[in-house]
Image (cartoon, rainbow, N blue to C red):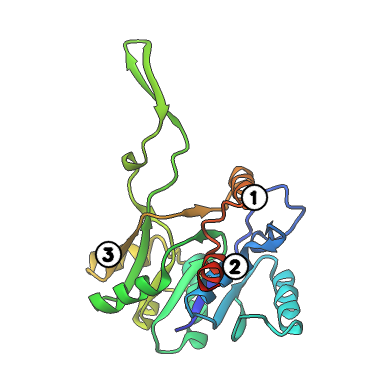
Amino acid sequence: MKAAILAGGQGSRLGGSEGTPKPLVEIGGRPILWHIMMHYVTYGFRDFVIALGHGGDAIQRFVAELRAGGAGPFGSVELVETGGPTMTGGRIKRLQPYLGDRTFMLTWADGISDVDLRKLADFHAGHGRLATVTAVRPPPRFGRLTLDGNRVTEFSEKPHDQDGWINGAFFVLEPAIFDYVEGDATEWERGPLEQLARDGELMAYRHTGFWACVDTPADLKQVRKLWDTGQRPWATWEKRACASS
């Protein structure tokens, strides 16, 4: 099963990265894209199809460096130019010739997680629908105030269970989903996912472990802090190495 990664977004909200494409912004000296690929490799998914757009040249150089070094643990890495202004659905559609008529995985190049990808794949195979999305709970961002009139009676961190489930990416998809995408201007999160849900073809795999979207400077600062302090919940390859030693 191939893993498709959308790495063509502009990533302007991240800021402060001196023009570096968001997938190549580093955590612990390695690009976010490398962290995501290593997570897939940990669970045996070694073949990648990467959608390029903004900053595609830089990502091509990164992959060339991987290949020059023997590609490490990665298998095949196919790079597909999908156009700068192309929306997420359009990028997925452009990957169709490279993904063929087999089940495939899909994620974005800014989300890191410790989701068990094998269990995710098994869940998808078990329900027989066209699409599976990993549902996650967003990390609490704000403290909660309990008020009595204008008086604060309690301040506490926002309980995790008060947040609803959100789209955490890490999809498993059947090739029939390409029929739900009209073209370059299609946003995956709008028409296709909404229609799949209406058709009863979208299932959710609930993940209660670690998940983070590295979308803002604050997000980047937080995950870099986790890495530097040795708290690396998404580094599943390190956990596997420790377990086998």
* Picture coordinates of residue 110, whole percent (x, y): 56, 59
Badge 2 or badge 3: first in the primary sequence: 2
Which element is circle 2 on?
Answer: strand
Quadrant containing the N terminus in the rendered view: bottom left
* Numbered circle sitting on residue 197: 3
Q: Which mark is residue 150?
A: none
**CB under 8 Å between callouts 2 and 1?**
no
Q: Is residue 207 left or right of residue 43?
A: left
> In the current view of this chain or complex, which residue is farthest to the front?
245
Name the disc covering residue 224, or none. 1
Residue in the picture at 26% in, 71% down: 201
Type of amino acid under label 3: Ala
Mark 2: which amino acid? Ala
Nearest the camera: 157 or 239? 239
Q: Earlier in the sequence, mark 2 or mark 1?
A: 2
Between the residue at mark 2 and the residue at mark 1, the CA separation in whole angstroms equals: 20 Å
Give the residue type that dot 1 points to: Arg
Residue under the point 34% across and 81% down = 176
